Image: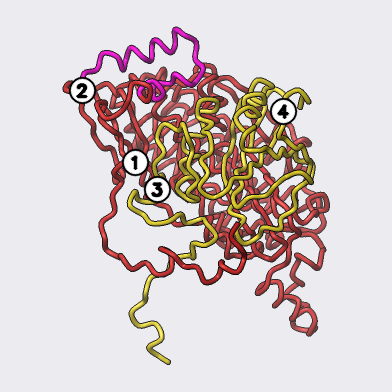
Chain colours: A yellow, B red
Amino acid sequence: MNAEALSAGVVAHEVNGQQLLFVELSAYLDTVTRLHNDGFTMCIDLTAVDYLAYPSRKVPAGVHTERFELVVNLLSIAKRERVRLRVQVADGIPVPSLFDIHPSTEAMEREVFDMFGISFSGHPDLTRILMPEDWDGHPLRKDYAPGRIPVQFKGAAS
Amino acid sequence: MTTLDERPTATPAGGVISSAGAATSEGAQELQPRSAISQQALMREAGSVLRLSESAAAELASVAGDADEDQTMIINMGPQHPSTHGVLRLMLELQGETVLRCKPIIGYLHTGMEKTGESLTFMQGGTNVTRMDYLSPLNNELVFSMATEKLLGIDGDIPERAQWMRMLLSELNRMSSHLLFMATNGMDLGAVSMMLYGWREREEVLRFFQKVTGLRMNHNFIRPGGLAADLPPGWRDDVLHILDMLPDRLAEYEVLMTGQPIWRERLQGVGVITQSEAIALAATGPILRSTGITWDLRKDMPYLKYSEVDFDVVVGLHGDAYDRYAIRLQEIRESMRIVRQILDKMPTGNYRIQNKKVTPPPRGRIDESMEALIHHFKIFTEGFKVPEGEVYVAIESPRGEVGCYIASDGSAVPYRMHVRAPSFVNVQCLPHMMRGGLVADAVAVISSIDPVLGEVDR
């Protein structure tokens, strides 16, 4: 990866032989655009992690952790390289949508919105994708317990 | 920032599902009428952000431009439609028989598998991921195991035999998955006998899987550290039987489908996608290759022992449904070529890593050693701890790039387990492929994507 492809607010890191970029939210769109111009034309995956129960995760010095982390996997076919962006996002803060740079993120951002409640500004159709439209809560948040359905005769033997 | 203490007690909506029976609604997720959306949104649907050439974008726009709302209608296709491969629901806006807009609505098979993955240990995780893409379960297990091994730092120590065995199973799985595609693709286009032939050949492969893993599907056979068991006696003859039987059958397919004018007419030029569209939509697998891009992770980012076998990446020229069919048919042959080389090169040795941390003791030891019994019990109840960190590993499944992202907090269960499902992303190509086509071709287009709704919805 070109050093010029990086901008301020980005900390480069390598773990397990995988390239990682810790990107500040303010530099997010700019970095993705630069990487796109640098050949990372495919946004293979976009997901998030809710670090509510694990705030002590390892990050390089200079990165201020927040509750959510947006994880974006970019791929360059020409260079056969991958790079992974990790963006710290606080609860309730909208994230700029990548749709205009990578249209492939349409469904992925909807999934993250549905599962984590992170909203994306500029997304053409930010609705729930996997859960029904009238669902309460965002299932993959760590303060959302797995559901259970009351069973009529459970415990009858005791 | 909220603290850790709030975690176990907080049970919002998910605590007990009390509103059972309440009607659910897709409302805003559905395809909206033209009057309800802005011109910009229409342009985005038409592909103005796909960085097409100006003429291509204008061509797309002209289809949408001449439509007046009172001349179009929005119809539902699915979720209960036999040719939508599960519970895919498409809302189509039609003008006469021409599809103007299309929106896939998914989630009908969502069972929260990523949430479930957060409560299963790394040892149990395979049972979960194997059910996502139920037509290529072994590939899903493989990518989950490889991600776990990378976190454990043992990805370089997996025995040779285990790696070759993984390759054997993964290639046979590619064959069985593509054979099923032949069957469903045939059925969708009215070649009903093809459906029976495809299922018949796939069954031969599944019979081998049953002999090796004990199950036809959802094997949980590839596990972190290696495999669950060694290959059974006589496996080589079984594989040779499949390899000897298939060429004639594939030749039959060629007569039945490839050489048939009706078949070609139905597929050629249908559901065309260009290179720039495929890249912008992150399509992988046969869809990307049908546009002429030689991208196959087995070749371009080799894993296992793919760099030691000789095979070709099959690409198309036109990016249409016919190319995608032809690529899959040819990929069966390439997989057979790989399997033959695996038969020659299969080394002897361990089928799993001899690392006490992740490997349970052999069954025989449990009867004679108390320590072995405890060790076995611990591994299967508590699992093994995986160091902190996060990792993304991707492999080439029959449908494209299947990736596994795991974040570990140092315990025996993944803190977060995400699977990048190829079908989930590929389904996004549907609106672009269908645009301007006939509603009768919609079925052919869906079929050519070969989506598995189990992994679309997870």
The picture quadrant where one finds residue B3 is bottom right
Find numbered disc 1 in the image and state the secondary structure of the residue it sits on.
helix
Which residue in the structure is indicated by mark 3? B107
Spatial CA span between label 4 and label 3: 38 Å
Find numbered disc 2 in the image and state the secondary structure of the residue it sits on.
helix
Chain under label 2? B
Question: Tag 2 or tag 1, which sits nearer the N-term?
Answer: 1
Which range of residues does the magenta coloring cover? B42-68
- The numbered dot on residue A7 is 4
Marks 3 and 1: which is nearer the front?
1
Task: Verify whether residue A136 appears in magenta.
Answer: no
Residue B216 showing in the rendered view: no
Q: Amino acid at mark 2?
A: Glu
Chain under label 3? B
The picture quadrant where one finds residue B431 is top left
Query: Quick check: B202 above or below B355?
Result: above
**Looking at the image, do the residues carrying marks 3 and 1 touch, with CB atoms under 8 Å apart?**
yes
Which residue in the structure is indicated by mark 1? B29
Q: Amino acid at mark 1?
A: Gln
Are the residues under marks 1 and 2 on the same chain? yes
Which residue in the structure is indicated by mark 2? B69
Are the residues under marks 2 and 4 on the same chain? no
Secondary structure mainly formed by the magenta segment: helix
Figure disc tally: 4
Report the residue that reaches farthest toward the front: B1
Q: Amino acid at mark 3?
A: Gly
Spatial CA span between label 1 and label 2: 20 Å
* Closer to us: B45 or A77: B45
